[in-house]
Image (cartoon, helix red, strand yellow):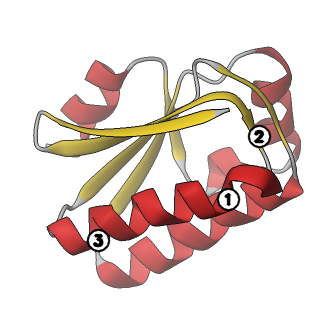
Amino acid sequence: MSITQRVWLDTTVIRVEDVFTHRNRKEFSSAVAAFRTSGGRHLIVNLHETTYMDSAALGLLALTSQQFSVEERRISLVGPQGTVKQILEMANIDKMITVFPTEEAAAARAV
């Protein structure tokens, strides 16, 4: 399980590879904290390579979305596939956070 972060087109992209669970929640939270410190306005969470997520990951996404709303920041999800896409849909996360097929589409929408 790997979480990487990079700046791209005036946004920050956090890429979650393999699984997104309680085991890597601190790594994700640290990446979000670094984003906040940078003064960024738009965070993209790329889930294209994510194969599974648990309730802790769902909770982190929901909490981050709520906090960003208050802070006038934006979070977008990109590329969830298979089981991860189904989990997000069942939890209605797509009602809180916009889901895009690509990073390019998410970045374009933020402008």
Residue found 56% across the figure and 56% down from its top: 27
Q: In this view, does 9 lie to the left or right of 28?
A: left
Label 3 to label 2: alpha-carbon separation: 24 Å
What SS does tag 2 mark?
helix
What SS does tag 1 mark?
helix
Residue 19: % across, % down:
75, 33
Please state which amino acid type lies under the numbered disc 1: Arg
Residue 41: % across, % down:
21, 61
Please state which amino acid type lies under the numbered disc 3: Arg
Location of residue 33 (image quadrant):
bottom left
Residue found 34% across the figure and 51% down from its top: 43
Q: Which of marks 3 and 2 is nearer the N terminus?
A: 3
Q: Do the residues labelled 1 and 2 touch (CB within 8 Å)?
A: no
Above/below status of 40 relative to 45: below
Which residue is most to the bottom?
Answer: 70
Please state which amino acid type lies under the numbered disc 2: Leu
Residue situated in front as seen by the camera: 26 or 89: 26
Q: Earlier in the sequence, mark 1 or mark 3?
A: 1
Residue bearing the label numbered 1: 25
Residue bearing the label numbered 2: 88
| 1 vs 2, front mark | 1
Residue bearing the label numbered 3: 36
- Please indicate, yes or no, whether residue 55 appears anywhere in the rendered image: yes
Q: How many labels does the image show?
A: 3
Quarter in which the N terminus is drawn: top right
Residue situated in front as seen by the camera: 98 or 31: 31
Q: Is residue 23 left or right of residue 61?
A: right
Residue found 19% across the figure and 61% down from its top: 40
Residue found 11% across the figure and 33% down from its top: 9
